[in-house]
Image: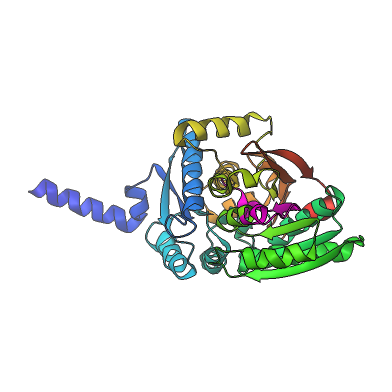
Amino acid sequence: MRSWRALSVCLALALCVFGSDMVFGADEIKIGVMVPLTGPAAADGLSASNSVKLAAEKVNAAGGLLGKKVVLVEYDDRADAKEGIALARKLIEQDKVVAVVGGSYSAPSRAVAPIFQEEGVPFVAAYAVHPDVTKAGDYCFRNGFLGHVEGAAAAYVAVNKLKAKRIALLTTDNDFGRTLVEGFKRYLSKAGKDVQIVSEQVYPFAEKDFKAYLAKIKEANPDLIQVSGYYFHTGPTLKQAREMGITATIMGEEGADSPKLFEIAGPAAEGFIIVTNLDRDDPRPVVQNYIKEYKERHKIAPDMVGASAYDAFMLIADAIKRAGSLDKKAIRNALAETKDYDGLTGVIKGFTPEREVIKNVQVQIVKNGEFRHFWVVTDPEVITP
């Protein structure tokens, strides 16, 4: 009995002096992951979750970080801002994570970014495009493209590669769509090209029937249609457009970058072009090994959401290694100093002072039901936020 009392006293003293993290979980490093695993964005959330787990397994198989095992603390934010805020608090106050992968959409990401900033927890948004995410402060980074950059890249492809003269814009009415179309129009206004926007329409996020919008587009007779939306928007759009006899080139962006697109659109997806974060034909081993392993494990092709989340985790892991410490400020500083990192979504040249990623924009085209290499945007004026 006395020995148990003595042990209890010693444990209590240790907790007081060293803190619970020094007694329990001393050989673990906790990294938070926020993903939408339920709701309309569940397919994207699952892709991000699966990919971060692959990345963590790779790191742990190589000995972990600083001699410690990485433990992922994952929560489903349902792509909802209010849910995200509660989970951010939980990751900080209960789970004591050292950093967080933002594997979710713009609405929850921009809601939680100020919380992580206030608490000094490094936060890397994998693919959220809204500018407010990084404007929250110097602990908030973006590995995916700022929406204005991706939108500008789409316009760059439209006029310089596809030689479009008459363009129709069809945009989902949320942070994602609005930011992308702003970037698209901004590039056109600066480019001085002889290009005309012949139709501009916005549809509700919950829209499924695009025939009325497409009828107006058909009447405007564009040679290119820029569709800013997610795969569950773009899939029906492609199918309905071709059924209506619209033959114009249709281009989208990373929201359409999902194998689910092919299930929805079927043959109508052939020739569809997107600006995105992942080049499936990139010969580098980091890319081809990831694609091979993901397909073998999950029986489905990976997408840019997963690849971006993988990179977000690996950037944090790389920063921890270079910092040689779990001090959050040291990790933040190491992230800011990232240079020429060989990422899955391309060589990450670094981050701007506003913590926006600098890397090439990939352009993919659908051939035989798969995304394949089409082009790459390297112009510094376009890819640099």
Q: Quadrant of residue 240?
A: bottom right
Residue 156's spot in the image, x, y percent? Answer: 82, 54
**Closer-to-camera residue (109/279):** 279
Name the residue: 72% across, 38% down: 373
In the picture, which quadrant includes the C terminus? bottom right
Res 143 seen here: no
Q: Which residues are magenta?
A: 240-258
Residue 10 falls within the magenta-colored stretch: no
Q: What is the residue that sits farthest to the left in this orientation? A: 1
Number of on-image labels: 0
> Is 118 located above or below residue 73 in the figure?
below
**Closer-to-camera residue (128/43):** 43
> Is 345 located above or below residue 157 in the figure?
above
Q: Quadrant of residue 317?
A: top right
Residue 32's spot in the image, x, y percent? Answer: 46, 53
191 left or right of 316?
Answer: right
**Closer-to-camera residue (32/54):** 54
Residue 133's spot in the image, x, y percent? Answer: 61, 64
Residue 190's spot in the image, x, y percent? Answer: 88, 64
Q: How is the image coloured?
A: rainbow
